[in-house]
Image: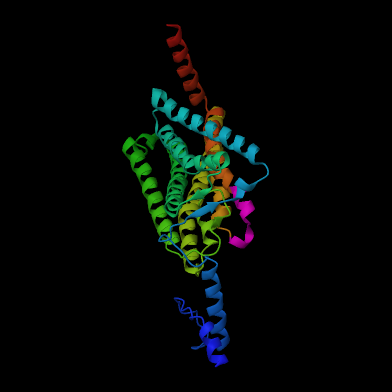
């Protein structure tokens, strides 16, 4: 009676039947050991009880951006980001306006340069405003959809700029190596097709990578060890095998990064050979001046991207990724208009002309 009464007072707890996904089979065998089953069952149930089970876009939560927002140099970083973003927006907007306003800059080279500045305006605006809000108000959380949108537009504008920089190298090659055929080879229609091709390539790259990245289940911490949603940082939170996707990521990196770099290298090898054969010192100096500006921008933009996307993850840490990402998200867009204007007499002349007109307008 005592045992039966005790059993009635303390009924046996009902067994919880978790929804199970079949564990991965041991390689080379078609069965699981009892130990494997128990390890999988309790580890899976522990994840679920901790509220950290696999989740994806169907979940109500999102991600939390960390990294720079938890730095002790919080105020200094905020001021620097605001200053650099303001300079980048002002410089690239001024470059677009100058090229549009001055008829002397209505050439294929400056048309492509205006597209580069136009891209940089949007490229920095994908990440920096959210970064400023995180520093200023502590708004470091981002929804799943918001993270996907940020990742798409970042890769869209970034890949478009990679392709556009390669096409700008072709423009310089034609101008120096085939100057007599330059008007026909670089007609306005050709320039429009080149720009459209770069935008189309960028959108295709972004669509593929965003769709593949967001279809993975995410588990563990929702904290992204980065200041924006970028593919390598998100892959660290994935609780699935990403080996196949990393191969796809490598292939897209080859197409968007390595092939343009090879094309730029080949173009400038031919340009260098042509410049060395010039008899005019002035012509040689002018050719090298325009090419050096483009090469500087190429190195500043492609170098950090190759480090982030082409090197294996074991070669860099989240902290290193933050520093490198700042180069192509903040610094390079700010420096592009400065680099192209400092050694370019046509741009500086157009700037003086516009400033002079504005001054005369105020006096009148």
User: In the orientation shown, which residue stands out farthest toward the left?
Assistant: 189
Horizontal relation, residue 192 to residue 155: left or right: left
Counting from the top left corner in percent of width and height, residue 154 is at 46, 48
Of residue 258 and residue 233, the one placed in the foreground of this image is 233
Relative height, residue 342 to residue 157 (above, below):
above
Of residue 241 and residue 263, the one placed in the foreground of this image is 241
Is 318 covered by the magenta stretch? yes
Relative height, residue 85 to residue 34 (above, below):
above
Which quadrant would the N terminus be assigned to in this image? bottom right
Residue ID at (50%, 18%): 352
In the rendered image, is residue 129 in sight? yes
Residue ID at (41%, 24%): 104
Which quadrant would the C terminus be assigned to in this image? top left
Residue ID at (45%, 56%): 255
Colouring scheme, one of rainbow, by chain, secondary structure, one colour? rainbow
Find the magenta span and give its range: 312-324
- Total label count? 0
Relative height, residue 237 to residue 201 (above, below):
below
Is 230 covered by the magenta stretch? no
Counting from the top left corner in percent of width and height, residue 27 is at 53, 83
User: In the orientation shown, which residue stands out farthest toward the top?
Assistant: 364
User: In the orientation shown, which residue stands out farthest toward the right?
Assistant: 72
Of residue 192 and residue 190, the one placed in the foreground of this image is 192
Identify the image quadrant of residue 338: top right
Counting from the top left corner in percent of width and height, residue 340 is at 52, 32
In the rendered image, is residue 283 in sight? no
**Majority secondary structure in the magenta region:** helix
User: In the orientation shown, which residue stands out farthest toward the bottom?
Assistant: 1
Residue ID at (56%, 37%): 292
Counting from the top left corner in percent of width and height, residue 302 is at 54, 48
Of residue 68 and residue 304, the one placed in the foreground of this image is 68
């Amino acid at each position: 009676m005592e045992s039966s009464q005790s059993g009635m007072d303390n009924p046996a707890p009902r067994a919880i039947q978790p929804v199970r996904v079949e564990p991965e089979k041991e390689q080379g065998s078609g069965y699981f050991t009892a130990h494997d089953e128990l390890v999988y069952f309790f580890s899976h149930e522990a994840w679920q009880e901790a509220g950290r089970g696999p989740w994806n876009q169907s979940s109500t939560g999102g991600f939390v951006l960390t990294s720079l927002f938890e730095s002790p140099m919080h105020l200094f970083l905020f001021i620097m980001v605001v200053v650099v973003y303001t300079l980048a927006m002002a410089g690239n907007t001024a470059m677009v306006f100058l090229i549009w306003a001055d008829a002397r800059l209505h050439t294929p080279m400056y048309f492509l340069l205006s597209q580069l500045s136009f891209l940089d305006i949007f490229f920095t605006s994908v990440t920096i405003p959210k970064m400023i809000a995180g520093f200023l108000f502590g708004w470091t959380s981002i929804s799943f959809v918001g993270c996907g949108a940020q990742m798409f537009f970042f890769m869209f504008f970034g890949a478009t700029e990679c392709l556009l920089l390669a096409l700008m190298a072709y423009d310089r090659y034609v101008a120096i190596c085939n100057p007599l055929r330059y008007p026909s080879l670089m007609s306005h229609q050709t320039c429009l097709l080149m720009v459209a091709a770069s935008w189309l390539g960028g959108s295709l790259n972004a669509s593929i990578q965003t769709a593949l990245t967001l279809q993975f289940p995410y588990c563990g911490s929702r904290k992204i060890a980065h200041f924006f949603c970028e593919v390598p940082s998100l892959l660290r939170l994935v609780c699935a095998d990403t080996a196949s996707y990393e191969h796809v990521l490598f292939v897209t990196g080859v197409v968007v990064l390595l092939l343009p770099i090879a094309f730029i290298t080949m173009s400038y090898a031919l340009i260098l050979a042509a410049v060395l054969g010039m008899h005019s010192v002035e012509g040689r100096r002018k050719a090298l001046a325009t090419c050096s500006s483009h090469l500087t921008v190429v190195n500043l933009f492609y170098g950090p991207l190759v480090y982030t996307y082409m090197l294996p993850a074991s070669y860099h840490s989240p902290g290193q990724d933050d520093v490198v990402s700042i180069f192509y998200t903040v610094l390079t867009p700010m420096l592009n208009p400065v680099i192209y204007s400092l050694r370019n007499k046509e741009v500086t002349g157009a700037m003086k002309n516009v400033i002079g007109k504005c001054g005369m307008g105020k006096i009148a």
